[in-house]
Image: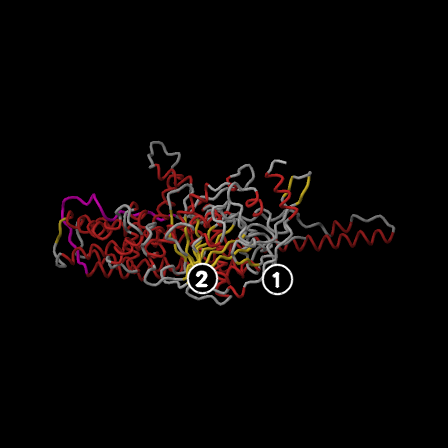
Amino acid sequence: MGSIDFDDGAADGLIRSARDAGTELRSQGSGRRSAAEEASVDFAGAYADRFLESVGIEAADRPKLAAVLDDLVEQVGQAKRDAAAERERLRDVAAWTERDEQRRRSAADSLIAPSALPEVFDPKPSEQATAPATIEAAFAARGRTRTGGGTGHGRSAADPVRLRAFAASSTIADDTARSRAEAVASALSRFRTSCTWTPVGDVSFVQGFERLLEENRADAAWVTRIAEAFERAGGSGALANASVDATIAQDVSTELQALLTDDLTPAQVADRWSGLGYTRDDAAGLAALPTSLLRVLGNLEGVPYWARSSANVSVLDRRIASAKEFLDDLDQPGRVYSPEARRDAENLTALESIKDSLLAGTGSAPRSLVLLSDDEPPLAGVSIGDLDTASNVTVSVPGMTSSSEEMFDWVDASQHVYDEQLRVGGPPDRAVVAWMGYKAPALPIGNLDVLHSDHAKAGGPKLAATIRGLDATRADDMPTVNVLAHSYGSTTAAYGLAEEGVHVDTFTTIASAGIPDSLPTADAVHADHFYAGQARNVWAPSQGTIPLIGHGQGDQYAVIGRNLSEDHHIDPTSPGFGATPFGADGSDGLAGVTDHGVHVAGDTGYLDRGTESLQNVAFATTGQPEQLSAYHRHDLDLGDALFGRLANGD
């Protein structure tokens, strides 16, 4: 009989973390209420009204989230009970089947017709499988109005000391709640992986929890800035609302205006940023800026990556919330939405995949969002490790079919690289950037874009801009910089690394779809070292000269991209090109690659753990070329002949 995929330990972990998170949220009520009441002393006017509105929203959203977590505990507990019942049913059916078979054998041996009496006293257990209920835990935190117009022409008063005390108290509470949020997100991720028997539906409480904390952080930053405005005015008395508006707005415009000038180079941006005096402690304050500013700041090359991530995560959460609001109210008559909200709704899958790829890093290396574009679907970049301090940085460029709709998968593959680098002796202070920064072509099935270079020529300059930005941001403490490219990503990366003013320490390709013909040798790209890995090329010739793809034996696509392409035919592992090739077919107890992908069933993709390919990638990107396993070329005469005849129209 079959079994079910349900790990009681993973379920218990989710129950425990959700219960702890709900308890923590409820326990904060008294402290937050007292802090708000204290801050309200001598706080009057329009800004005080805004403050009380935000406090009221937080006081309502927090217990609502706690109730959702309580319900999640009940659902997972029921799922655990259902799983136990289904296991027992399966055991009963298996035992009955064995007994029934024994009765049949006994009857056959005795040459006597089987009696119906045993079935009366031993009825067959139910064959109706237990249907697990779908886990649902939806929650969306509300946004809050803070700064800007609408405060009127009156006056406001405040005690900056009390306001700062509120911000400090709120931050302490948020830090504790954040640890609970991270724990429940990690437990949910494990549950989804280990308890696939139980379907998981809308669990937006993870994003909602993070949004609640971000709104709290933004409140603390906003209250602090109001306190600063009153401190500049002497620390007491009343100020005109217009003056407070102008002071807060001036902080934004004065400090960031210099960065928003068109045509600044990354080096110029970095220089101007350094004069602003921002530190990581200002991340919450940046998150309170208007979305229009955050969209620019989050993708501005030369700005530190912690600031870019703070901006991008805030924008990402706002876009997800806007998209869900649009979809929730889609049937409401008379509702008017911006084109941006409609566009984000159409790209919600990608936006949520990006968010999931950030949350999945909980408990391991920190992850940050260093790129988030307005493209459809959005382009994105997730750094695993601290990109501002890492001594070794690897930018991983995906190949065909990749998009941010499956951002989680590419980030997971990049996590494998990050982990393997340490396993083979790489530096602990490293970072791997899962760079989904260009629009990749689809599979060559009904679409032949992968055989052309349009996508690569468009994506190459974007990668070049990323490298130049890294050079400028880390100019005073330059790390070792590596580019790792898979499939068509190697074509894209080659164009980028051939641009003037771009240089990296290593360039590594795996499963290359072909280096552009305009770059005939490894020296044509600006990399000190060029490495290339390729599994055996497989095909199954049939029907005369028509090659059919062979699966489960090696790489079924790379050779097609190279041999049938319009202008990127060069195999970087070929003799005379000048790259250092390495093995990927398996050796010394390591698995060989059996598919073109980086993640495949059986864990035999180019970046799956335990493969010769992944280990060699880690060696190549951590300055250990002497450790690379040897590459053994395969006899490609048959394939070359087949592909050559096809290309010639024979």
Residue 48 appears in view: no
Q: Name the residue under label 2.
A: 364
Q: Picture coordinates of residue 604 (x, y %)?
A: 59, 55
In the picture, the disc for residue 587 is 1
Residue sitting nearer the eye, 87 or 364: 364
Q: Judge by depth and name the residue closer to the eye, 345 or 237.
A: 345
Proximity of marks 1 and 2: CB atoms separated by less than 8 Å: no
Image check: 246 left or right of 432? left
Q: Which of marks 1 and 2 is nearer the N terminus?
A: 2
Q: Residue furthest front?
A: 576
Q: Is mark 2 on a helix, strand or loop?
A: loop
Q: Kindly identify the amino acid type of the residue bearing the numbered disc 1.
A: Ser
Number of residue marks:
2
Q: Where is residue 434 in the image (x, y as percent from the top left)?
A: 44, 53
Q: Nearer the viewer, residue 335 or 221?
A: 221
Q: In which quarter of the image is the C terminus?
A: top right
What kind of element bears circle 1?
Answer: loop
- Structural distance between the alpha carbons of marks 1 and 2: 29 Å
Side (left or right) of 214 relative to 185 = left
Residue 145 magenta-highlighted: yes
Closer to the camera, 211 or 647? Answer: 647
Residue 163 percent coordinates (x, y): 22, 58
The residue depicted at 61 percent of the width and 39 percent of the height is: 646
Residue 89's disc is: none
Q: In this view, does 645 lie to the left or right of 316?
A: right
Q: Is residue 102 visible?
A: yes
